């Protein structure tokens, strides 16, 4: 049995409630969008020092951009002065090691004027990043404070990671994995409503281009219209979506979702003038998929689906282009009965959390730790994903308290005390 009674853990977290709220609010005030994370990370670094820990900045090398797993974005600021933060705590020996990770970057809030002015109201913290993921950062800080306050020493090594660039595909996490971070288990913190997710849906963005022969509208029937060619592409993409849905039935971790996979047609543009036959059309979209498919399969199947057309123009070289230049998050899963989710479920039960174990129909950094790093990984945290990225983003303070209690108990039971 664990040396530290669950009740003592619950009480210790409760004593830190006000501090946890303060941490979350302070962090929300930093508009830490891509390229602007340094001040938020500096604040976090200072708070970790105050807790008595020895945080380390980890540089992200510019060479990471050449990594096949790197996620490119429209704007890619220099990594100079933009770092991950890592705290390592050596165990007493012979226990399982554990990484606890979350991210300190947020998405923009252009339509929400008060996004970076946090509000505490009716048991909620409201502000950009409250759920995704400033509330997670504050919860993890509270977890670390309880370990300190109760003098909890565990046998396994602990590593706490606070990364950047999760919102553009996970480049901060990728950098740490390429730098050799490894543990017997990983908990990635996101807003799961305190449920435990040992698998994530994957997501990949695509860009299609069709090319025609631009002419004056009076010569329309002598031209080839790139928009009409794209209509043919879309027809076959939607056929592929139905096939993807059919192939995804029976995935145990995801069987509670009505629509766990999908193909989204997100943006389209083409043409130069209303009375001119369109010479080039571009379509951008995304595909959500389950762990029964690898990302490489999705890429291949999308191309093959379009090439089923009887349209000979599209089949000719240079008339249809399919690219994957941006987000590419693979799906992953470990068994529901793996020791990591089962140990965490048991620990959460000890502190009276009604957590469940199933797959998450969202993608996040977790797949990198599992697919690239080869580590058993789960996702867990307070808050609801439906509130992430939304105007009025919020998180329940009570869930933050419960999450910290569950994390402390999990650390004890996974790493050994």
Image: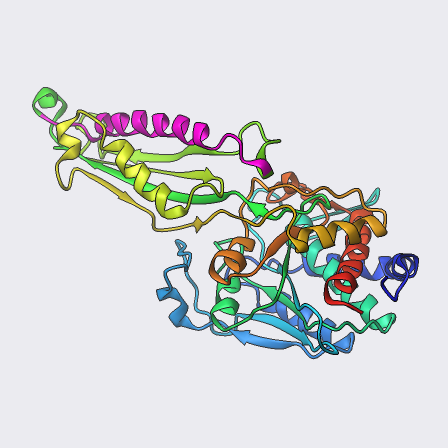
Q: Nearer the viewer, residue 413 or 29?
A: 413
Magenta stretch encompasses residue 247:
yes
Give left or right: position of 364 versus 387.
left
Residue under the image location 77 percent in, 52 percent down: 403
State the colouring used for the structure image: rainbow
Q: Position of residue 39 (x, y in %)?
A: 61, 68
**213 or 137: nearer the eye?**
137
Helix, strand or loop for the magenta stretch, by majority? helix
| Residue 84 part of the magenta-drawn span | no
* Left or right relative to 78: residue 415: right
Front residue (pair 131, 194): 194
Q: In which quadrant of the rendered image does the C terminus lie? A: bottom right
> Residue at image x 41%, y 54%?
73
- Residue 125 in sight here: yes
Residue 128 visible here: no
The residue under the point 74% across, 49% down is 345
118 left or right, relative to 241 = right
The answer to whether 366 is drawn above or below residue 203 in the figure is: below
> How many numbered discs?
0
Residue 35, image x and y in percent?
Answer: 50, 63
Which residues are the magenta region?
223-252
Q: Position of residue 110 (x, y in %)?
A: 55, 46
Q: State the residue at coordinates (49%, 43%).
A: 291
Q: Quadrant of residue 264?
A: top left
Q: Quadrant of the N terminus?
A: bottom right
Location of residue 271 (image quadrant): top left
How far across and how far down the image is residue 296, in percent? 36, 47
Up the image or down, 250 lies above or below 345; here it is above
């Amino acid at each position: 049995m664990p040396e530290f009674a669950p009740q003592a853990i619950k009480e210790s977290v409760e004593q830190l409630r006000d501090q946890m709220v303060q941490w979350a609010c302070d962090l929300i005030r930093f508009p830490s969008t891509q390229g602007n994370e340094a001040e938020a990370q500096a604040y976090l670094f200072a708070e970790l020092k105050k807790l008595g820990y020895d945080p380390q900045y980890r540089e992200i090398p510019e060479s990471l951009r050449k990594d096949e797993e790197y996620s490119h974005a429209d704007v890619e600021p220099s990594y100079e002065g933009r770092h991950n933060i890592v705290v390592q705590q050596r165990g007493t020996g012979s226990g399982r090691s554990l990484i606890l990770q979350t991210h300190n970057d947020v998405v923009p809030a252009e339509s929400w004027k008060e996004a970076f002015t946090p509000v505490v109201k009716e048991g909620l913290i409201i502000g950009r990043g409250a759920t995704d993921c400033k509330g997670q950062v504050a919860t993890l800080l509270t977890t670390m404070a309880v370990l300190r306050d109760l003098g909890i020493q565990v046998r396994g090594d602990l590593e706490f990671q606070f990364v950047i660039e999760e919102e553009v595909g996970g480049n901060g996490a990728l950098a740490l994995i390429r730098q050799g971070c490894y543990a017997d288990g990983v908990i990635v913190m996101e807003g799961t409503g305190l449920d435990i997710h040992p698998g994530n849906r994957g997501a990949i963005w695509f860009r299609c281009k069709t090319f025609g022969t631009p002419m004056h509208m009076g010569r329309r029937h002598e031209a080839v219209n790139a928009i009409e060619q794209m209509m043919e592409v879309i027809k076959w993409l939607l056929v592929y979506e139905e096939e993807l849905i059919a192939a995804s039935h029976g995935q145990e971790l995801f069987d509670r979702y009505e629509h766990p996979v999908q193909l989204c047609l997100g943006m389209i543009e083409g043409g130069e003038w209303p009375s001119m036959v369109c010479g080039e059309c571009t379509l951008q979209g995304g595909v959500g998929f389950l762990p029964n498919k690898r990302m490489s399969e999705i890429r291949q199947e999308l191309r093959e689906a379009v090439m089923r057309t009887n349209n000979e123009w599209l089949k000719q070289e240079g008339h249809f282009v399919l690219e994957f230049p941006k987000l590419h998050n693979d799906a992953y899963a470990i068994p529901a009965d793996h020791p990591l989710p089962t140990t965490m479920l048991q620990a959460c039960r000890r502190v009276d959390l009604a957590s469940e174990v199933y797959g998450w129909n969202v993608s996040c950094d977790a797949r990198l730790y599992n697919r690239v790093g080869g580590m058993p990984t789960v996702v867990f945290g307070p808050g609801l994903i439906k509130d992430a990225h939304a105007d009025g983003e919020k998180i329940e303070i009570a869930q933050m308290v419960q999450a910290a209690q569950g994390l402390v108990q999990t650390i004890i039971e996974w790493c050994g005390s």
